[in-house]
Image (cartoon, rainbow, N blue to C red):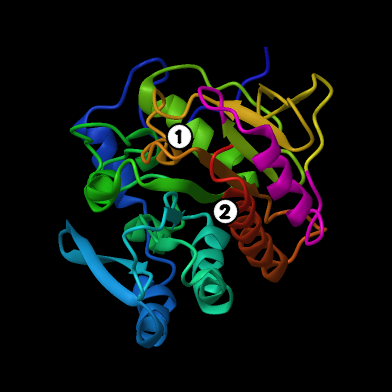
Amino acid sequence: MTTHAPYPIGTPGQPWGAAEKSDWRARQTRQRSYETDVLHEIERLSPRFDVVQYGQLDYSPETYPLFAFKSREWRDELPCALVTGGVHGYETSGVHGALQFVDAQASRYQGRVNLVVVPCVSPWAYERIHRWNPLALDPNRSFRDDSPAPESAALIALIAPLRGRFLVHIDLHETTDTDESEFRPALAARDGVESVPSEIPDGFYVVDDSDNPQPAFQQAVISAVAKVTHIAAADAKGEIIDSPMIAQGVIEYSMKPLGLCAGITGARYTTTTEVYPDSPRATPAQCNAAQVAAVCAGLDFALAHPHG
């Protein structure tokens, strides 16, 4: 069986301890600015929306305030919708797609749905272009009670008062070449297991919830994004990232048991988008536009079919 080369941290077959995690953390370098890229945009958009600080991450010597946009004309009789980006900080179009949606499209939904948009759940990872937080934890496997990831715990606390009121949750992600070259090998090394190569799909796809499948909703998202960028095809085994493709560009995960962000609201309609920014057939602008198209298509479908 083909495997990855040994990861440079730790001993093969042995899970990381505190020393290995410290070594890993010391290797992470700041490559871009959350303040410049995200906080300045939030400030620019703040005259048009309610902006709430829902937490702060204290990773000495750095601190990261966490912000969400909310509809200014909030009406309790309306359903709620959650849009999240940057759960994995390295997935750039998730962050900038969320901000672009707020800037260009959110006003279309005024008076129809109460919006909550969290553009960057994991700012430390955004700055370091990484999947994990500094504790070597994946926030997108940590959305559960008593979460060990502060990023996940803060988001859960933000939406807790609204549980039961969400109609839709769209979580914006990317699948990148570095998933295969760095992040999966790092995960295997951290957990002391063998790293087995997989295949990165070329194109956009979505992840439905196997415990609450909504195929028509997912197809509406796929159809809208197909006008912006190409949709991923299945591999020779009929799979996308080792999961069966159940419809064009659609796979399923069990959201809540896996601790995934898209499982936190209990919404009727949920999806995790996956843009492929490393494709020679896609530009950064297309990737952002694909995320915006996914959000709009998801909201439009949910509002047109609020009861399924």
Say above or below: 9 vs 159: above
Residue on which the image places disc 2: 303
Say above or below: 129 vs 268: below
Residue 248: image quadrant is top right
Residue 178 vs residue 137, the one in the foreground:
137
Residue at figure coordinates x 68%, y 60% from the top left: 290
Residue 148 vs residue 297, the one in the foreground:
297
Is residue 267 left or right of 75 when viewed as pictured? Answer: right
Is residue 200 left or right of 295 when viewed as pictured? Answer: right
Which label is found at residue 93? none
Q: Residues within 10 Å of mark 1 (few under 14, many from 20)?
A: many
Residue on which the image places disc 1: 186
Magenta span includes 208: no
Residue at figure coordinates x 35%, y 46% from the top left: 165
Distance from the alpha carbon under mark 2 to that under mark 1: 41 Å
Is residue 145 left or right of 271 when viewed as pictured? Answer: left
Q: How many marks?
A: 2
Which of the two discs, 2 and 1, labels the residue nearer the N terminus? Answer: 1
Magenta span includes 227: yes
Question: For the C terminus, which image quadrant?
Answer: top right
Residue 287: image quadrant is bottom right
The range drawn in magenta is 209-231
Q: Nearer the viewer, mark 2 or mark 1?
A: 2
